[in-house]
Image (cartoon, grey):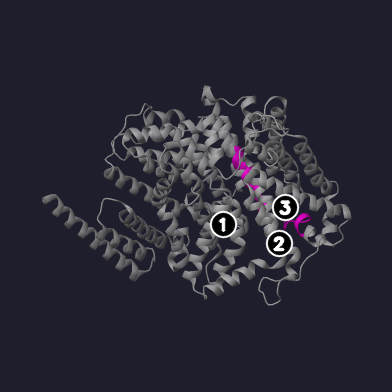
């Protein structure tokens, strides 16, 4: 399972928020792969021989942005002829392969992108001085404006119009803010083109800010690592091991899929890609086990989204959290550990209930025994463990993942089918770059939003508005924040929605006493959960396409499986003991609050499952909410209510059995 099949790749392209890339061929494909491989090699080298921050980010974007225009179609000019079924000249529409070749306009845009990014690199010290001294030349301003337009087009090509329009709105706000009524909180004095360009183009507050740093450092390194794992055969091993580990019980097929999704997430880091990769193998097994289409799709989507939520390779937003908080990536992994445990506990409990509800049964799968697999291929875990160990030994996340990548490469020679010779090395390096192109475009364009917010003070103003609307009530502010992040996530990718929400909603929460770590992790979880939230729920839509189930019902089943992930973030924001769920505080408190939260998750599983009657399910829901307050009195009350729910269920069950 080293690469997605054509059908799987099309499903990912159709349901991922990132648009499908061109399928290049011939010399052009080779050239793009060579350039991509060189960019990956450069990214690996600068880990040990660092380059000044602004110069590194500009250099990275100078290579990545032209590749975006060559690898991603415009999708604008051919639209009307396609709708009419005619070609541009009135004849038959061009065959699909025609759009796979870059046009003259694509080459022109690629050249322009290279030019406007090489311009400051020719004398970066002088360029930086001109920006800090508000002495930009006419050429600087033209180049900065051109880069702005190019980034907007790159984002439109890779992730669509939504983020592009949001960026344009922020630019208009920066330029015309002085025309807003003087008594409006969001009004400002206004900025001219040279001031806007200086903010976005000449320093690390705009295009080349923290999001771009994350793309050019963290994300590229982890995509290279994922590609090396993939080419070394780890994906196949993870799936085989998951199927071998759960063989006999009726809940085994569902647990197998969930475990495989967790392991595959270390390779893909994408919810939709993991869902599709897993679905092609797991759906036939779930069908044989007796799962209906919609619950099966829900399991696939819930397992897939775990790819972004789970250590050790969380989604791109987690790297941004580390940069914003100025903490190590290992600390962010620790923040995510207990919520991840609770997330998978909820899925496993829901699967156990559904296996009884749907009458599923064990399925014999042609897979080697788990012990034999671990003895033969267990070395694939070593690089994952090594990342954590190295970071614990105070190695940077950058160095840790590069060393782990080298180890994964070396260990590939233990498997003759997946030995990474020169060709596979080149393919893995190129894949690492090509997979990061959409994220790079998003992160650079997100610099427009962050830069404007910083320049105008909009972030603090909007935060104040949110707090005022909620009348300073933390519960209402948190609820409004969750809804806002989820709505934002319906329109833009996870990374972009996190960046926007972090600079606007984060301060609203911290103003009311929430720590920065709690606020950012809250935003992170709700940005990720937009992928399983109706009405879009991209992972659920992809799962429904695989199983052939009803899309809406699949979304709702996914929502039920992932419900703990929606509620647990409220616990670590609203309650004093909630920080324990992020691994903060005395170890005894952490363990106790984790145990209480686990009971709350079990109560949620009982409340949303279909085995119990409505009275006990309602009681279980109340118990779960009380327990998640994580305070002594609510905990005791929650346990009491849960005990009543269990007693009611047992009494009703005995009466039903004796009838």
Which element is circle 1 on? helix
Q: Residues within 10 Å of mark 1 (few under 14, many from 20)?
A: many
Q: Magenta stretch containing residue 200, yes or no? A: yes
SS for callout 3: loop
Residue 423: percent from left, percent from top:
64, 25
Mark 2 is surrounded, within 10 Å at the Cα level, by few (under 14), some (14 to 19) or many (20 or more) other residues, namely many
User: Can residue 321 be seen here?
Assistant: no
| Relative to 51, 261 lies left or right | left
As displayed, is residue 597 above or below residue 391?
A: below
Instruction: Name the residue carrying label 1.
Output: 488
Near-viewer residue (414 or 261): 261
The residue indicated by pointer 3 is 208
Badge 3: how crowded within 10 Å, few (<14), some, or many (20+)?
many
Residue occupying the point 53% across, 72% down: 512
Q: CA distance from mark 2 to mark 1?
A: 18 Å
Against 580, residue 51 (above or below) is above
Residue at image point 76% right, 60% down: 199
Q: Tell me which secondary structure the magenta stretch mostly adopts.
A: helix
Depth order, front residue of 627/12: 12
Give coordinates of residue 550: x percent, y percent.
Answer: 41, 43
Query: Mark 2 or mark 3, which has the lower sequence index?
Result: 3
Range of residues picked out in magenta: 199-224
Q: Nearer the viewer, mark 2 or mark 3?
A: 2
Q: Secondary structure at mark 2?
A: helix
């Amino acid at each position: 399972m080293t690469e997605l099949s054509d059908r799987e790749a099309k499903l990912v392209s159709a349901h991922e928020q990132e648009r499908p890339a061109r399928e290049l061929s011939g010399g052009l494909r080779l050239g793009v792969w060579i350039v991509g491989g060189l960019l990956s090699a450069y990214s690996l080298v600068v880990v040990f021989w660092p380059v000044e921050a602004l110069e590194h980010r500009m250099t990275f974007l100078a290579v990545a942005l032209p590749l975006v225009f060559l690898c991603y179609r415009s999708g604008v000019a051919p639209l009307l002829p396609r709708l009419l079924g005619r070609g541009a000249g009135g004849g038959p529409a061009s065959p699909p392969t025609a759009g796979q070749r870059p046009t003259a306009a694509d080459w022109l845009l690629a050249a322009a992108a290279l030019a406007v990014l090489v311009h400051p690199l020719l004398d970066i010290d002088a360029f930086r001085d001109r920006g800090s001294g508000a002495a930009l030349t006419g050429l600087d301003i033209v180049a900065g404006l051109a880069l702005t337009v190019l980034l907007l087009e790159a984002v439109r090509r890779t992730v669509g119009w939504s983020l592009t329009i949001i960026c344009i709105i922020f630019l208009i706000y920066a330029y015309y803010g002085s025309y807003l009524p003087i008594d409006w909180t969001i009004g400002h004095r206004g900025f001219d083109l040279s001031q806007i360009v200086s903010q976005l183009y000449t320093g690390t507050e705009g295009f080349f800010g923290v999001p771009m740093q994350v793309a050019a450092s963290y994300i590229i390194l982890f995509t290279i690592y994922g590609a090396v794992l993939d080419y070394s055969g780890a994906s196949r091993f993870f799936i085989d091991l998951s199927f071998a580990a759960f063989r006999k019980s009726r809940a085994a097929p569902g647990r197998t899929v969930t475990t495989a999704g967790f392991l595959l997430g270390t390779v893909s880091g994408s919810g939709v890609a993991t869902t599709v990769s897993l679905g092609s193998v797991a759906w036939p097994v779930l069908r044989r086990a007796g799962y209906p289409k919609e619950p099966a799709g829900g399991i696939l989507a819930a397992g897939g989204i775990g790819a972004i939520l789970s250590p050790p390779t969380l989604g791109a937003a987690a790297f941004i959290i580390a940069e914003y908080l100025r903490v190590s990536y290992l600390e962010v992994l620790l923040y995510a550990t207990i919520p991840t445990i609770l997330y998978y506990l909820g899925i496993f409990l829901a699967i156990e209930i559904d296996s009884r509800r749907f009458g599923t049964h064990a399925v014999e799968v042609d897979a080697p025994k788990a012990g034999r697999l671990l003895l033969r291929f267990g070395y694939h875990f070593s690089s994952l463990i090594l990342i954590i160990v190295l970071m614990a030994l105070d190695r940077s996340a950058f160095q840790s993942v590069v060393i782990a990548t080298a180890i994964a490469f070396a260990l590939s020679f233990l498997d003759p089918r997946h030995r990474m010779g020169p060709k596979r090395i080149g393919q893995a390096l190129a894949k690492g770059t090509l997979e990061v192109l959409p994220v790079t475009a998003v992160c650079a364009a997100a610099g427009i939003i962050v830069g404007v917010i910083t320049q105008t003070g909009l972030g603090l103003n909007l935060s104040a508005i949110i707090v005022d609307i909620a009348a300073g009530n933390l519960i209402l502010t948190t609820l409004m924040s969750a809804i806002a992040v989820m709505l934002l996530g319906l329109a833009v990718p996870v990374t972009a929605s996190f960046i926007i929400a972090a600079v606007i909603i984060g301060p609203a929460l911290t103003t009311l006493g929430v720590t920065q770590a709690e606020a950012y992790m809250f935003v992170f979880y709700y940005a990720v959960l937009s992928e399983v939230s109706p009405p879009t729920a991209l992972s659920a839509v992809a799962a429904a396409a695989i199983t052939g189930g009803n899309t809406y019902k699949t979304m709702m089943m996914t929502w039920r499986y992932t419900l703990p992930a929606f509620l647990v973030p409220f616990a670590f924001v609203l309650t004093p003991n909630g920080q324990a769920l992020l691994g903060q505080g005395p170890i005894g408190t952490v363990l106790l609050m984790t145990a209480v939260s686990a009971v709350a998750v079990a109560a949620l599983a009982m409340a949303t499952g279909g085995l119990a009657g409505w009275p006990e399910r309602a009681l279980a829901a109340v118990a779960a909410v009380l327990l998640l307050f994580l305070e002594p009195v609510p905990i005791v009350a929650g346990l009491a209510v849960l005990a009543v729910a269990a007693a009611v269920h047992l009494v009703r069950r005995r009466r039903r059995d004796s009838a």
